[in-house]
Image (spheres, rainbow, N blue to C red):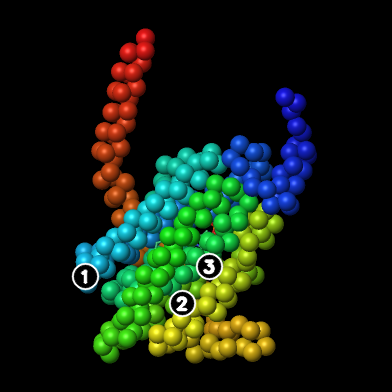
Amino acid sequence: MKELNIDELKRRFQEKIDNDIKIEPKDWMPDDYRQTLIRQISQHAHSEVVGMLPEGNWITRAPNLRRKAVLLAKVQDEAGHGLYLYSAVETLGADREETIDDLHSGKAKYSSIFNYPTLTWADMGAVGWLVDGAAIMNQVPLCRCSYGPYARAMVRVCKEESFHQRQGFEIMMKLASGTPEQKAMAQDALNRFWWPALMMFGPNDADSKHTQQSMDWKIKRHTNDELRQQFVDITVPQAEMIGLEIPDPDLKWNEETGHYDFGEINWDEFWQVVQGNGPCNKDRIDARRKAKEDGMWVREAANAYAEKRKARLAKKAS
Ligand code: FAQ
């Protein structure tokens, strides 16, 4: 087959992007496009896996069997999301173990939200409602991402995240309509998770170094600020419906724009958490490192078994 020159390869790549034709693993793609996807998808995978920790913290203390079964299923879903995403990263030629080592060494990021502690049962409600709610807002457009394996993984992930969001909202709804102590617990969880949930969407557009290029490549379909605004617009009426108050004195419906105006995010806190100085960063990474070390013997045993089996089959075939 005739070798195509680089200009022709670039032209064909751009034509696919322009026509919304998915880029697939064996297609030619610019190196920067590949690296951007490896960065974003691996960080996304890490977020799903680290995200199991704050909720895993409550599985043994869920208030009843139904709550426990639902929470357990949710946390298992997050593990599944992590695995799909690591597989999607591998389709780009990256080594899964190397990306995980980058997480453990602090080189790779994961979502800032998971560096906050889950102090009460109501936090399970706030995480499901707000954190999964924000995750869905960000991930539904990723179902139309230009890279096929990522887009397809997102379809199933979003279906599961919708169930997660509903289970969180249901916890909050129940607590908010319970005793005064339960309502206060729900309000306290909302107070602590509201601003970190808004930070999940990333820096303001003016400070987001990757957004423009990612939008041009149709990896991202909306900017960070657009998605954050959509999240606020959808979530504020939900809080009102269950009688909880959003902890923002500047929050106000704006007749002219048809959106809520909201207060300034504490960007200093955001960058501190992203740089590893949040309340739980150290605990989260220590837990992931320990999980890798504790699971080492299982991987070694599985590899030894696979090697032995391969040798046996080769002997049989000869
Ligand atoms: N936390 O230029 P941008 C979930 C970094 S999944 C930490 O705007 P970009 C499910 C960013 O990486 C939640 N770092 O970057 C669940 C970059 O640093 P770098 C995760 C952040 O990529 C629920 C730098 O700042 N979702 O919750 C954050 O265009 C419940 C500059 O930022 C995804 O990963 C942050 N919040 O936009 C699980 C979705 N924001 O890489 C368990 C896919 C920004 O240059 C329980 N990712 N940074 O060193 C995305 O959509 C994008 O990557 C953004 C950031 C929007 C996160």
Q: Residues within 10 Å of mark 3 (few under 14, many from 20)?
A: some
Q: Residues within 10 Å of mark 2 (few under 14, many from 20)?
A: some
Lower position in the chain sequence, tag 2 or tag 1: 1
Residue 296 in picture, x, y percent from top left: 28, 40
Lower position in the chain sequence, tag 2 or tag 3: 3
In the picture, the disc for residue 34 is none
**Mark 1 CB near ligand 1 (8 Å cut):** no
Instruction: Determine the residue positioned at 55% across, 79% down.
Output: 233
Residue 151 in picture, x, y percent from top left: 56, 52
The answer to which quarter of the image holds residue 165 is bottom left
Task: Report helix, strand or loop for mark 2.
Answer: helix
Task: Please name the amino acid that badge 3 sits on.
Answer: Met
Instruction: Determine the residue positioned at 55% across, 83% down.
Output: 262
Residue 217 placement, left or right of 127? right
Instruction: Select label 2 or label 3 by which is in front.
Output: 3
Task: Please name the amino acid that badge 2 sits on.
Answer: Trp
In the picture, the disc for residue 195 is 2
Task: Report helix, strand or loop for mark 3.
Answer: helix
Query: Vertically, is 316 above or below 236?
Result: above
Instruction: Select label 1 or label 3 by which is in front.
Output: 1
Residue 42 in picture, x, y percent from top left: 49, 50
Q: Which residue is mark 3?
A: 137
Cα–Cα span, label 2 and label 1: 29 Å
Cα–Cα span, label 1 and label 3: 30 Å
Task: Please name the amino acid that badge 1 sits on.
Answer: Asn
Residue 147 in picture, x, y percent from top left: 60, 49
Instruction: Select label 2 or label 1 by which is in front.
Output: 1
In the picture, the disc for residue 64 is 1
Relative to the observer, which residue lies in front, 165 or 219? Answer: 165
Cα–Cα span, label 2 and label 3: 16 Å
